[in-house]
Image: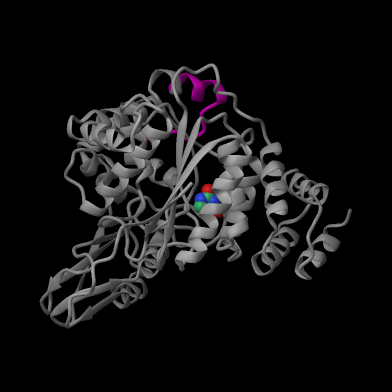
Amino acid sequence: MRTIDLIQRKRNGEELAVEEIAWLVESYTRGEIPDYQMAAFLMAVYFQNMTDHEVGAMVEAMIASGERLDLSMIEGPKVDKHSTGGVGDKTSLIAGPLAAAAGVKVPMISGRALGHTGGTLDKLESIPGFRTDLTADEFRKQLSEVGFAVIGQSDTVTPADGKLYALRDATATVESTALIAASIMSKKLALTLDGLVLDVKVGTGAFMKRQVDARKLAQMMTTIARRADLRAQALITDMSQPLGFAIGNALEIMEVSQTLQNAGPSDLTRISLELAARMIHLGKLTTTIEEAREVAQKKLLDGSGYQKLKQMIQAQGGNPQVLDRFELLPNATGAMEITSPRGGFISAIDAEEIGLASGMIGAGRDAKEDSIDAAVGVVLEVKVGQKVDEGSVLCRIYFTNEERVTEAAERVEDAFRISAQAPEPRELILDVVG
Ligand code: URA
């Protein structure tokens, strides 16, 4: 087989065979296909899409690039949660601990920042000492003892996703339904899970800008799960403005801490509680979703979700005190206020622009090998629907290096729309699939 032939056929809209996709993924993972050829293939997929058959083959090939992690010896229902990516989306670090506090075992394989969106692993690594490279045995042990463990793709678990994820991020090939579904589902099916809750984001800050595409992605992923005998449910949730107030790695850890102490933003709290309830229900710890909602709420109010996150941080080598003492997290050295040019109502906050501006000052990566500046980001002072006066602070940009702050500030300013009328309120949870 020759890579160039497969690129050409995909570019021309042909369907590739299972063995061809398997060969491509395996050879790329082993370093036998260069990045430039794989990037061309990904771009062909971006434009031509993949059939269900091809996506299934891609998922299998990506799982086969590493080992499957058997968790069947661990007692209790194993349920994971994964988001398709959004700006300010830190729900995994709230829903995960709440579900674990309720008795669900939460084995999470998370991702890094991708495109304009943040990644759970990067957020966790802003905690001094935190390790995301647990061995399979450490992961299992922590899951048994703490009930919540977070790792990333590695040399053993879906290494193909690790390589492809970074390549897609640097080649503008992230926003493909087929590639997103294959990336997420390969990580999830590499573990023996009992349930999976998917949060499919839609809106400017998501990869899916239209609800019909988000639905397609949700259906694709829940169908892959069903074929693999995995109970899965997808929520389609609004990402037309950033979730919560904080965008940026350490800043988001601070907001996670506040939210798990029931002092967080209402949109973030609401979605996280619903995701936790779905995890509890899929794990069959309650018979109805209403009961599961009550359990999730209780775990928030009694502080056990918050304690669970601390236990997880400690178990993974991090300092759990960061949740109480934010000065122990990386902190920015400068801040710039963005103020409203006139009075009125906030009618939109373009989440993609805010995500891109945060990336520009170091919260994300431009190239595969770039490092992240954990301290930087944006903290909103207002949300859509709020009334502001001329000169009111809309948000603050936190930075450590002045180089691109002016450019980022212009982007952030342009992200806010102010109108004379209050906008219609938008639903946060738009649909449930599966
Ligand atoms: N999350 C993933 O793990 N992969 C994607 O492609 C997008 C979001």
Quadrant assignment, res 71: top right
Is residue 27 part of the magenta span, yes or no?
no
Residue in the image at 71% along x and 37% along y = 64
Q: Position of residue 60 (x, y in %)?
A: 70, 42
Find the magenta span and give its range: 127-142
**Residue 144 in view, yes or no:** yes
Q: Is residue 242 above or below residue 82?
A: below
Residue in the image at 68% along x and 47% along y = 56
Callout count: 0
For this orientation, the residue located farthest to the right is: 1
Q: Nearer the viewer, residue 298 or 431?
A: 431
For this orientation, the residue located farthest to the left is: 389
Residue in the image at 64% along x and 30% along y = 68
**Residue 129 in view, yes or no:** no
Q: Position of residue 86 (x, y in %)?
A: 41, 57
Relative placement, left or right, of 81 versus 21 is left
Q: Nearer the viewer, residue 89 or 391?
A: 89
Q: Position of residue 260 (x, y in %)?
A: 24, 39
Q: How is the image coloured?
A: one colour
Is residue 129 part of the magenta span, yes or no?
yes
Q: Nearer the viewer, residue 381 or 17?
A: 17
Relative placement, left or right, of 388 versus 256 is left
Q: Is residue 319 above or below residue 411?
A: above
Residue in the image at 13% along x and 72% along y = 387
Q: Nearer the viewer, residue 41 or 425?
A: 425
Q: Position of residue 432 (x, y in %)?
A: 42, 51
